[in-house]
Image (cartoon, coloured by chain):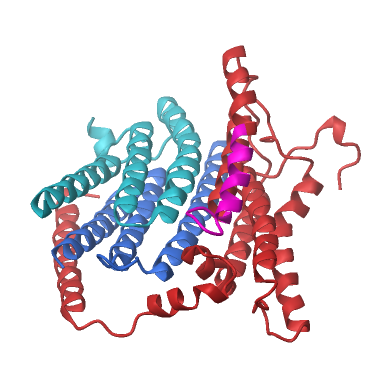
Amino acid sequence: MNRPAKLMIGLLLCLFALVLLWVFHVALTQPPGARLADLALASLPLSGVTNPVTAVLVNYRAYDTLLELAVLLAALLGIWSLGAATPGFQPAGSALAAMVSWVVPLLILTGGYLLWVGGYAPGGAFQAGALLGAAGVLLRLAGDERAGLPSERAQRRLAVAGIAVFALVGLGTMVAGTGFLTYPQRWSKWLILLAETAATVSIGVILAAAYAGGKPRSRASDGATP
Amino acid sequence: MTLLLFLFDLVLLSTLLVLAIAALTSPEPRRAVMFFIAFGLWLALVWARLGAPDVALAEAAIGAGLGGALMLAAARRAARRQREGKADQDDDQKSS
Amino acid sequence: MTAHLLYGGAGILLFVLGVWSFLVHEALLRKVIALNVMGSGVFHLLIAIAERGSLPPDPVPHALVLTGIVVAVSATALALAMGRRLEDEDDAR
């Protein structure tokens, strides 16, 4: 792209920024209308958790989270359909290998802690899943071609587990008569924990598999590949 | 006190913008990704200041950490292709 | 009010910077970084709106941003995988 065109784009975008800023200013100076925040915070005792963000994610707007797991799954399917994973790195030196053997269990432990603490403090399924994914990335960097994940068949099941459990919980509440993903109050804490645990495992597996960048290669130790 | 807090906010935001500009304008792919990771971590800091620790945790772990790892792998490939002269080059890369 | 305007304005600036970089640069990786910065700008604007001074912050935008971050990373991974495949096809030819 030549210089004048770049300048033109820059100028137009400056104007665009000014318009956006003006709109934002007008929106701020208007008297605030009713906000969802008050409703969300007021019904917090009914939701089964005390962390408002987790309550919004897994209880009030559980549809969003369900569909988001579907988006993650679709991205992984897209990546797998593009070809085989790149070959892994060479095996790690002794210092890196020793560090990884310490850090990976710690990451998994911290992931479990974040998942549990998400009910009443900052944390939750996404953060915990990200830590599991990070453990996978570390393992791949240390030379494990498959980022610490099991065989392809098991990976498929784990990646679908999150959305499947979430949908099953939703169907279960529907059968129980409260409507799709509307938890009965007595069970809500445990149903949320169940759905979140499955979501955590799925997110971790999907992120680690996405880092490997393609369909996992079969290993001789797998036996027959599907 | 409020003036001090205001100055603190100003420093936070100007550093954030400088990191973003550095990530967007650096022609060398690996350096751009490094700046992007720094930008993501700084953004997490700003969000912790804005009272959103949940989101700050997620941004530090997912946005900066995993996104950065993905992009670093891509930057390694891009740097190798640039050395072999196969890359589709930008204007400012040709001039440098 | 001023703090809102300051933080929200920074979000808008980040978004516009991302758009600029996305339009001007050609290499795929730089476009992906630009897209991520654009997304970060929007997220930052949402978080800035959610902050309410002495009141506890609004959890609904927080949850939206949390979802958005994960979706942005999965989109990044897919885009980079597609770019890798394109490069492989180029090299094969």
Judging depth in this view, the residue of A88 and B82 nearest the camera is: A88
Relative height, residue A143 to residue B25 (above, below): above
Q: Position of residue A39 (x, y in %)?
A: 43, 80
From the viewer's perspective, is A167 left or right of B6?
A: right
- On the question of residue A18 being in view, the answer is yes
Relative height, residue B29 to residue A153 (above, below): above
Which image quarter: residue C41?
bottom left
Judging depth in this view, the residue of C26 and A76 nearest the camera is: A76
Relative height, residue A87 to residue C40 (above, below): above
The colour chain B appears in is cyan
Question: Looking at the image, how many numbered discs can be counted on the residues?
Answer: 0
The colour chain C appears in is blue
From the viewer's perspective, is B2 left or right of B31?
A: left
Q: Residue shown at 66%/61% (left/top)? A: A193
Relative height, residue B13 to residue B31 (above, below): below
Query: Which residues make up the magenta segment?
Result: A106-125
The colour chain A appears in is red
Where, quadrant-wise, is the C terminus of chain B in this rendering?
A: top left
From the viewer's perspective, is A22 left or right of A169?
A: left
Q: Please name the predominant secondary structure of the magenta segment in the image.
A: helix
Q: Residue shown at 63%/60% (left/top)? A: A74
Q: Residue shown at 63%/65% (left/top)? A: A70
Q: Residue furthest right?
A: A224
Is residue A137 in the magenta section?
no
Judging depth in this view, the residue of C78 and C92 nearest the camera is: C78
Q: Residue shown at 86%/43% (left/top)? A: A225
Q: Position of residue B61 (x, y in %)?
A: 48, 44
Is residue A123 in the magenta section?
yes
- On the question of residue A142 being in view, the answer is no
